[in-house]
Image (spheres, helix red, strand yellow):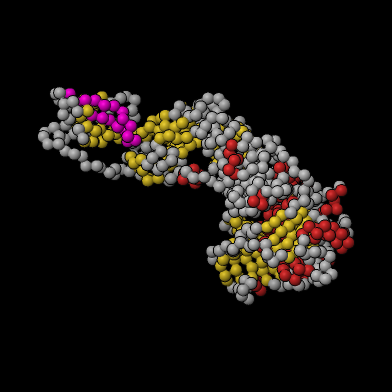
Amino acid sequence: MESQPGPTSWFTLDVAQLTARLAQAPPETLRAEAISVELPYPNGTLHRFAITRVPVLAPALAARYPELQTYAGWALDDPATTVRLETSPSGLQAQVLTLAGAFSVGPDPTASHRYQSRADKPSDFECLVKQVAERELAGTPPPAAPAPYGAQLRTLRLALAATAEYSNNLGGGTVAGTLASMATLVSRLNAVYERDLALRLQLVNDNNRLIYLDAASDPYDNSNPTTMMNANDAVVKTALGAGNYDLGHVLGYRSNGYSGVAYVGVVCTNTANSNNRAAGGASTAGTLSSMTTVLTHELGHQLGSSHTFNGDQGNCSGGNRNGTLAFEPGAGNTIMSYDQRCAPDNVGSGISFFHAGSLSAIMPLLTCGTLTSTNNRPPSLTVPPSTYTIPKGTPFTLAGSGSDPDGDALTYSWEELDRGNAGGLAVAATDVSEPPLFRSFAPEVSPERTFPMLSAILSNTASLGEILPLVPRSLNFRLTARDNRAGVAAANLTLTVAATGPFRVTAPNTPLTAAPGSPFTVTWDVQGTNQAPVSCANVQILFSADGGLTFLTVLLASTPNNGSAQVTLPPLNTTQGRLKIQAINNVFFAINNANITISSLLPVKPAAVEAGPASQLRLWPNPARHTVEVAGLAPGQVAQLYDLTGRLILTAPAPHRGPLQLVLPASIPAGIYVVRGGGQSRRLALE
């Protein structure tokens, strides 16, 4: 069943004026001359996009249907945000891909002459993939990172057939209308395939011959995707000839939900499976948006990727898991996963990106088609060496670096590449078969990722789909950099998880209020991390004034990893202070569990005052250096010196005659302390 739509805005659109403007768009080879148009976002704001003409119909087919035009572009305020537009007699269609998700612009089906901008939402669908027998590869090394690519664009000829039910419901009952819907689908597919795979699909010259309008003479059984798929090979070969396409698929219509089926890895084949280039897949759906989702997934199978989920709950149970690419915990959430269909092991909303494992499976199979220059050079990428050993149950941060020779803004994604036995999230942390623990997220502009996400660490809560390992094992990761112009670079990294751990802060772990410059002691549970195999001899202690979002203040640049250190609070005011103990020459860390308040105006608790001349507790000098005179104590009363964490530093009784001379330990740092005695307390500044 379809999910409810996301945020929506409505607007009127002068289609004729916009179409005329788009007609001025240059070909994609003249990127510098791109025109600009404004498009509305679902929140009602307008954003400008640079637009070029990018055809998805083969030249002869485009000449027969000149009213069908397709375009591509990027947001002028965010080059990582891309758009695909299509114009036809039925109006304008557009889909915008952002790092936060996708949204569509198109005619409002409930009101003529009105358009809507609506956030796309994932829907539930059934995939009946046809694949080789499952192979369990638990504990095997991850696939090697592909060499950088994107200097050339590979174009494959796509033969896309349509049942009469599809044509009459999503194509207006005409060949031209159905071809227009196909152009929209292929345009949106290419937004993802070009970005991730440097691959473009183009509808074949005689694709109109594969569109059926009459169910009585239609060669397909629209109610059964598998039967549709099996019939498609003969239909396409008869209509086009075996040598006139690289990939085939058939579209059907389904009023409720959607489903698909495909063979894995049938692209560019010259073996016994070559017949499956056309009988490779079938998809049924009720809207263009849902068809885009299922077709992106099913064609991903035909291009070479099996499913990427490792879960065994809900719809993930049964025969659709394949151990070869089971890199995603639970249901997974990338294109080739079972996003949101494997409760209770769903790990979050889906993202329109291929997992790094899918890229490794697909790229070696792309050996046919036509290559053209993109006038773009791929990025370069570096990651740390695979020499780190970290304690179990302990957060860590991976950081790489990238650059682009053309100055393109890069986006990055860190993803896990581990294969273990099939299993649910509840047992993954202690599974010695080394299953995947960390879900994928949409690429970001930063080449860093913290595991688990920082917000979960700061709130002391679990992060869905991010599980810290609790047993010794390896963790394999890949950093992928995209320039969002078909340029991609990737590099692998391996961490070793030790049996020791977790490494954690033990104090302060409750709310603390202190003055700027106050000294106090930080303690942490070393858990043997200063010994082999972790071998972290020293740590750095950092301070955050914004609740842990950034740690910009260095309290100690280096201190022995022995579980205790004296630090001094920085000269600032905050109610959201946090401490971070960062391993030096390693990637793991720990953050304390509660905020620290630093305030120049500390609350003063009224002290009880005793009658008599000796009732007033007095300190001199204040500030002090080595010795402070404590007056106002009765003979034998004890003076106590505390730091602002409440740690008792020393005690001394008042003499029978004269004031107490309190000798301050040479080892304590300068800062604010508290002297208590006789039921009273006074602050002492130590220089």
Residue 390 image point, x, y percent = 56, 32
Q: Magenta segment: does it hold 646?
A: yes
User: Do we see residue 583 in this rendering?
Assistant: yes
Question: How many numbered circles are shown?
Answer: 0
Q: Quadrant of residue 624?
A: top left
Q: Nearer the viewer, residue 563 or 397?
A: 563
Q: Is residue 656 above or below residue 33?
A: above
The residue under the point 16% across, 29% down is 634
Which residues lie in the magenta part?
639-655
The residue under the point 42% across, 29% down is 564
Q: Magenta segment: does it hold 462?
A: no
Residue 376 image point, x, y percent = 69, 50
User: Do we see residue 381 in this rendering?
Assistant: no
Quadrant (top left/top right/bottom left/bottom right) for the C terminus? top left
Q: Nearer the viewer, residue 210 or 314?
A: 314
Q: Is residue 490 above or below residue 10?
A: above
